[in-house]
Amino acid sequence: MVISDFKEKFVDNPVYVFRNELDKLVRNDLIEVCENCIRLTNKGLDLANVVWEEFV
C-alpha cells in the first residue's frame, strides 16, 4: 500500500489509523512500514491471510 495514495483517498494516515494492527504485524515480521509504503515481508507473503485478518 502506498501511504500517500491512502491519505489522498481517505485523508487519514494509515500508519496512525491502523497503528495497533501494524505494530503487531511488524513485531511478527509479517509487514514492513517504509517511508511511503506498507508491504508484506517474505514471511508475510506466505501468511497473507493472517495479515488481512487483522484488518477485517
Image: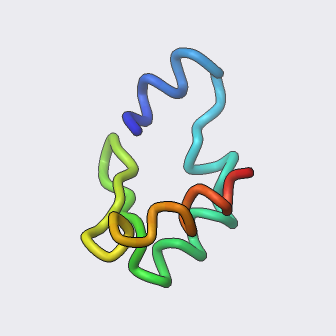
Instruction: State whether residue 25 is above or below residue 1.
Output: below
Residue at the far right: name it.
56
Residue 34 coordinates in the image, percent (x, y)? 31, 54
Q: Which quadrant, please, contains the N terminus?
A: top left
Instruction: State whether residue 9 is above or below residue 38.
Output: above
Instruction: State whether residue 30 is above or below residue 12.
Output: below
Residue 3 coordinates in the image, percent (x, y)? 43, 35
Residue at the far bottom: name it.
28
Q: In this view, does 50 lie to the left or right of 12?
A: left
Point 39% across, 50% down: residue: 38
Residue 10's quadrant in the figure?
A: top right
Q: How many numbered badges does the structure rendering display? A: 0
Residue 40 coordinates in the image, percent (x, y)? 35, 60
Point 65% across, 64% down: residue: 21
What sort of colour scheme is used for the picture? Answer: rainbow
Return the residue nearer the eye: 17 or 49.
Answer: 49
Point 64% across, 49% down: residue: 16
Residue at the far left: name it.
42
